[in-house]
């Protein structure tokens, strides 16, 4: 990881691999859903899903390839998290919740919560130092399946 003093660098390769793995898994789900279009959604209805998936892809590429400053890395990682979580939310809405509302069904069992990506990011180095902690990105070990 980068030093918080203005150095340029990239995230650790292990973290980059996890980010790419998360992106590839979600991208595959999105592509399969869009290609099949079993719910007969219009282009406009799929626009947000595609937009978030594209943003997630660009952020993951920037994180693993481009050298950035400390603050830019934090912003890019936060963008990846945001796009990833928005992609998951839109995907789950179309795959699960919209179908239930159309069919008038309720869930018989609680849906599984995706825990692939957890953690918090901050660019406030002084806050981190005051808490006697290091700058961490936490990625759950499970792949969520």
Image (cartoon, helix red, strand yellow):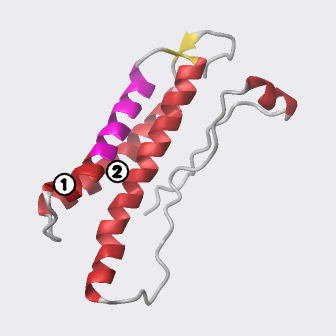
Reading the image, the residue beneath label 2 is: 25
* Mark 2 crowdedness (10 Å alpha carbons): few <14, some 14-19, many ≥20: few
Tell me the element at label 2. Answer: helix
Looking at the image, residue 61 sits to the left or right of residue 19; the answer is left
Where's the N terminus, which quadrant? top right
Could you tell me which residue is drawn at 37 percent across and 52 percent down? 87
Cα–Cα gap, marks 2 and 1: 24 Å
Q: Which of the two labelled residues, at mark 2 and mark 1, occupies the earlier sequence position?
A: 2
Q: Which residue is mark 1?
A: 44
Which percent across, then down, holds residue 46?
A: 22, 55
Give the secondary structure at mark 1. Answer: helix
138 or 74: nearer the viewer: 74
Magenta span of residues: 51-65
Residue 52, how many percent across, how many down? 34, 45
Picture disc at residue 16: none
Residue shown at the point (26%, 87%) measured from the top left: 103
Give the x, y percent position of residue 129.
82, 27
Q: Image point 47% across, 60% down: which residue?
A: 144
For the C terminus, the image quarter is bottom left
- Is residue 136 part of the magenta span, yes or no? no
Residue 24 locus on image (x, y percent): 33, 45
Q: Quadrant of residue 71?
A: top right
Which secondary structure type mostly characterizes the magenta part of the structure? helix
């Amino acid at each position: 990881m980068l030093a918080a003093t203005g150095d340029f660098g990239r995230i650790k390769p292990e973290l980059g691999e996890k980010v790419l793995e998360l992106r590839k898994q979600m991208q595959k789900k999105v592509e399969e859903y869009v290609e099949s279009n079993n719910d007969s959604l219009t282009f406009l209805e799929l626009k947000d899903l595609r937009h978030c998936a594209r943003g997630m892809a660009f952020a993951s590429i920037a994180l693993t390839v481009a050298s950035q400053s400390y603050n830019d890395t934090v912003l890019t990682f936060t963008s990846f998290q945001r796009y990833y979580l928005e992609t998951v939310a839109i995907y789950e809405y179309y795959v699960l919740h919209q179908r239930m509302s159309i069919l008038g069904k309720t869930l018989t069992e609680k849906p599984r919560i995706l825990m692939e990506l957890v953690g918090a990011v901050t660019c406030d180095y002084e806050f981190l130092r005051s808490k006697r902690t290091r700058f961490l990105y936490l990625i759950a070990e499970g792949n969520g399946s």
